[in-house]
Every structure is written in structure tokens, then in C-alpha cells.
Amino acid sequence: MSRIAGRFEQLARQGRKALIPYVVAGDPGLDVTVPLMHRMVENGADIIELGVPFSDPMSEGPVLQLGHERALANGTSLRGVLELVSEFRKRDADTPVLLMGYANPVVHMGYAAFADAAAAAGVDALLTVDIPPEEVAPVNAELQRVGMDNIFLVAPTTPTQRIQRITGAASGFIYYVSLKGVTGAGHLDVADVARHLELIRGHSSLPVAVGFGIKDAESARAVASVADGVVVGSALVNAMAQAIEGGGDHEAAMAAAIALLVEIRRGIDNAAS
Amino acid sequence: MTIDIKENVFASVPDADGRFGDYGGKFVAETLMFALAELESVYRKLSVDPDFQQELDQDLAHYVGRPSPLYEAKRWSRSIGGARIFLKREDLNHTGAHKVNNTVGQALLAKHMGKPRVIAETGAGQHGVATATIAARLGLKCQVFMGEEDVRRQALNVYRMKLLGADVVPVTSGSRTLKDAMNEAMRDWVTNVDDTFYIIGTVAGPHPYPLLVRDFQCVIGREARRQAQEQTGRLPDALVACVGGGSNAIGLFHPFLQDEAVAMYGVEAGGHGIASNQHAAPLTAGTPGVLHGNRTYLMQDADGQIMHTHSVSAGLDYPGVGPEHAWLKDIGRVNYVVATDDEALRAFHTLTRVEGIMPALESAHALAYAEKLAARMSPEQVIVVNLSGRGDKDIHTVAQIDGIQF
Ligand SMILES: Cc1ncc(COP(=O)(O)O)c(C=O)c1O
């Protein structure tokens, strides 16, 4: 069983929902990412989603665009991200790590080379925003070869017949995008999310996590009451950026992210109980 | 690699998945897949609907002003002393460039799909102007995304779009040029996909855009083919067009692809020269990758990050290129070459002074290469150059380079 499947099973037994924080690797500094990952795990993260920075992050809103730009300015590359995961794995063999990014850096490295290097680094899964099921066969073959999960997005606009196609190619969990828009947008409709999750569950027994638009304890609680997991990204990245803008150092940025994460964890656990 | 061009492979691409060989496809976020499928099915229906075709032809004739002339540049040809050069006068279209052929077509699609709002990305501003123009005529809401750098160097076109009622959004992310404008347009589309039609300005983007933009631009090549036969009694020996995303080039080339004897040259922006790394020539100096919804040649670094490009012409300042060109390069059907900033500027001045025609700086890249090519050919031979747009929008840039202040 993959680390991700194992983690969701364990959470289901405990009656808990997954908290999946997203941060951009290398933002606000290359030295922040690994300590931040450990501290997120200590403070309630169940799975870590690491953003692989890209020059043209087409699905990101302004907050994460800046995160990607800062990470690239800090010299973060895909190989560099894999090194960070290796480093993280020296002290944490249990927490699943998912890489989220765009096709081109992976395409450029080559699917086979990426799969080998990512598996060796201890990466559990890949989510490429711009590789839909239509284009996924060659990369999926490589991920399966090394036992990595492939995470797919399902969107509010995904027709029912497509959901089946997506769940057929997916493993680990399904990532439901809670709104039409870019990351960090603010118009979450929980009743609508609940309706879509029901549709997805009609096609797949995989856990379903929800992301895009969850920014605080309250929205996390609302989503956790209907989903198996909650992804929080822009809010954490923004908390760190604000801390730095206010004159804080990397330590202050981490503290700001962790404070928010703890609040969100509490929101999620309130939903479950 | 070469292929037997007698079996009509050119009509068989893209395939049902939008692929031109290894290139093209639909590399977009899931939220947009539905919109692309919807667009594809509407387009498949309308492209064979005689009423739609008639409506389009009427617009092209009476609104755009087609057919555009095929003009023999005799004085310029004589001064070079080689082949006869003919100019396909897309600069004479309404709004001053080939871009309008495509916006008229896509706006009709938007109208048939009942979308009240259109968006577009623009570099030189020509596609933005062409979109704003057709939006004004059809009463559609229009928002145009334009890199901040291009807003500065194409100020005239920005004002033109505003006069037409469009909202111009300066894009401040990344390199602040065309690729970033396209990112922002994609973000807008993802957010407003229910009521918005995205009018892409070139043969790039996800399937079916490279197909439908090509179809709308092929009017250039169909006319040129007929006009060349009327005026010279035969097909041209060579075709030359500049390549940004590649829409004016594919529009000219495509109706001739099966004619083995017709040589084709796509001219990319050489900027300060290929060796300087400051250029926008992905087919000449790039490698395959995935950007803006399709697999194609890209300018990228060792980590697969997209590189900043440079060209004196905003409309060529793009790190990718339409996937059909990537395929045509690999199969060896089209030659892709470069002209530098300096060569294009010289050609701009030459054509203006010798023929009284002021070309867009984009088109000037094609002229610069055509001049070299013509010199190697004989006076019985014929070259058709796509004069994709007029140079009014570039006067400010040229004046600045020449050290003139208004
Ligand atoms: C006059 C003109 N020619 C050429 C281009 C380049 O585009 P494409 O390669 O799609 O024809 C532009 C783009 O803005 C343009 O304005």
C-alpha cells in the first residue's frame, strides 16, 4: 500500500480528516522548506504538498504567483526540490509528500528520469496541473513503474462521464478543485462542493481532498465536514509573505505559517467531532 | 526526417486529440477541459455549416476588405537584382494586420455560443485591437491582457483598444510580455469560463485553437495561390513569413504544403543574434516542451523554466510557437530561419523608402530574409512574402531607436 493510501486509512480509522498544507519549495528561502515541513508535521499536517516553482504558473492566483517567483529567484529547481525531499526523509519516513507543479519541468527532465529520481528521494505522488487524463499515459506508466501515485484534479466543470475517466487514471486520492478560478480565490460554496463530492464518490472509492479557496479555520471546518481532506495553500504562503514584508526573518515567517496551520487543524477537528 | 508529401498528410493533422506528430495536444487545467470540448464540438459543426461560412465570407469581404492584394514590389525587387518579390498585403486589412481574419471568425463562434464576453492576450496590440474591434461591432464585452512592457512600447494600440471600448489590463508578472499576458488570459478564462470566450491570437494554445486559428488564417494562402497564378501563370517558388506564434505564416503556407516545388521559410525573431541568447527563436534555438496548453519547441533553461525572450517587435516576443510549425520543422517541410532586430529595422526603412509601404516590425523580419533569399534567386523566380501588418504602431519604437523625440 502506498504511503498516501496508508495515511488515509489510518485517518479513517481515527475518524479524522486529512490536513494537507501546500507551500512552494524554496519560498521564502531554500533553507526554510525542510524545517517548515517538519514543523507542519509536528503541528497537525497529515500529507505535505510541495509546490514545484514554475516560470509560468497559469493556475495560480497572485499570492502563489509571487511564491513561485520568489522560489525561482532563490534558485529552486526541480532537482533542488527532490534534494529537499531527500533531506526531509532523513527524519521523517512516514509523512506522505506530494509534488504539485506544471508539466514542463517534468517533461524537460524526462518522465523516466523524474520517476526514478523522485522515488529515490522519497516522493510519494505527483500532481501536474496541466497534464489532464488525455495526456497522462506516458507519465503514468513511469509513475506506476516506481510505485508513485498520480493525483488528478476534478473541477466544478468536469462532466460526469469525465469523472469516471479521471478516477480511472488516478491513485492515492482525488483532488477536487472547489471553485472555478485560480488558487487563492475567495468564493467557496460548500453546498456545491458537497454535491460534487457525492458525484465523485459514486465513481470511486478513493478519498477526496478539496482545495482552492480554503483560507481559515472556518472554511476548513466547513469543507472538512464533507471531504476526506483539506488542502490549504495560498493562506499559508501569504502568512509567510506578510511576516517577511513586516520585517520578520525566516523564523518569523515559519511561526506565522504554523500559527495559521494550528488554527486550521482545530477547525478541521471541530468538523469531525 | 523527410516524408512523402504526396500522400496528403497535411490534411490529416491535427488528429482527434489535437496532435501534429508529437506536438500539440491539450495540456490545460481540468477546469478548462470542458470548455475546450464544447468549443471543439461547436467548431466542428459550424465549420461545415454553409450559413456560418457565408456569414464569415461576408464579413471578410465587406468588413475586413478581402481579398487583400498581391502586390509586385518591382522597384524593391530590381534593386536587389534577384527574384521577383510579391507582397501579400495583409497590412491593408481593416485594423492593419492579418490578425483580424481570425478574430472575425472566433467572434462569430462566440456569438453562436451565446457568450457575452470575450478576452484576448496581445503582444504588439494588433490582436488586441482586432479583438476589440470585432467586440465593438458585435456588442460584446471585451477585456485584453497585455504585458506591462508591451503596454509601454505599443502605447498607440493601447489607446486604440480603449477607444473601441475594451478594457486593457496591464500584466505585471514574469517577463511582462506576451507569454505573461497569455498566462493571465488563461487565469481569467478559468475564472469566468461560463460566460467568456477566449479569442487566442495565434496558432498556439490547447487544441482546438491551433486548428481553428489556422483554418481562419488560411484565407491568406488560398487567395495568394489564386493571385499568383493569375499574375504569374504559376505557383511561387518560395513563400516567406515571420513567425511569432505562427498564425500569419501557417495561413500563407498551409494551402501550399502539398506543392512540393514551393519552398517555405518561416522567419523567427533573431533579436540581438542567436549567440547572444537574446532572441525569440524557439524553432531555431529551442527544445521541445509544454507551455500554454500544447507541446512544442520552447526557449527554456536546463531546469525547464521558460526563458525571457527579446525582440524589437512585440508581436514576435514569445518563447513558444504553434505546434504545427514544430511538426513542419521536424518533417523538414518548412525551413525556419532568423532575422535580427537590426536586419528587420533595415528592411523596415528599405520598404518604406523604396515602395512607399511601411511594414510592421514583425513583417519586416520576413522582408529582411526575403531580401537575402531573392538575391540568391533568378529574375524568373517568384517569392511571395506575407506583409502581415502595417507599421504605424511601430513608428514610436523606430523613432526612439533612431534617437528622435516627438
Ligand atoms: C503584424 C503582425 N505580424 C505578425 C505577428 C506575429 O504573430 P503570428 O506569428 O501569429 O502571425 C503579429 C503579432 O502580434 C503582428 O501584429
Image (spheres, coloured by chain):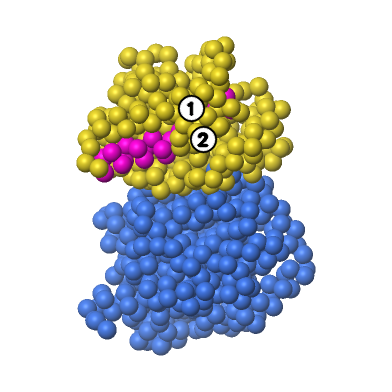
Most foreground residue, A57 or B353: A57
Q: Are marks 1 and 2 in contact (CB under 8 Å)?
A: yes
**Chain appearing in blue on the rendered image:** B
Give me the chain letter of mark 2: A
- Name the residue tied to disc 1: A267
Examine the image and state in which quarter residue B62 appears. Answer: bottom right
Q: Residue at x 73, y 62 (%)?
A: B46
- Residue B332 visible: no
Q: Is residue B396 left or right of residue B327?
A: left
Tell me the element at label 2.
helix
Classify mark 1: helix, strand or loop: helix
User: Residue A18 at x, y = what percent?
Assistant: 51, 22
**Disc number at residue A219?**
2
The image shows residue A21 at horizontal and vertical percentages of 43, 29
Residue B15: give x, y in percent of width and height. Answer: 65, 48
Q: Is residue B395 visible?
A: yes
| Residue A122 located within the stretch drawn in magenta | no
**Magenta: main secondary structure:** helix
| B313 left or right of A127 in image | left
Q: Which chain is yellow?
A: A
Amino acid type at circle 2 is: Ser
Question: B164 or A90, which lies in front?
Answer: B164
Q: Quadrant of residue A27?
A: top left
Distance (Cα) linking label 1 and label 2: 8 Å
At label 1, the amino acid type is: Gly
| Residue occupying the point 50% across, 51% down | B187
Give me the disc on residue A69. Answer: none
Q: Quadrant of residue A248?
A: top left
Residue range of the region highlighted in magenta in the rendering = A227-245
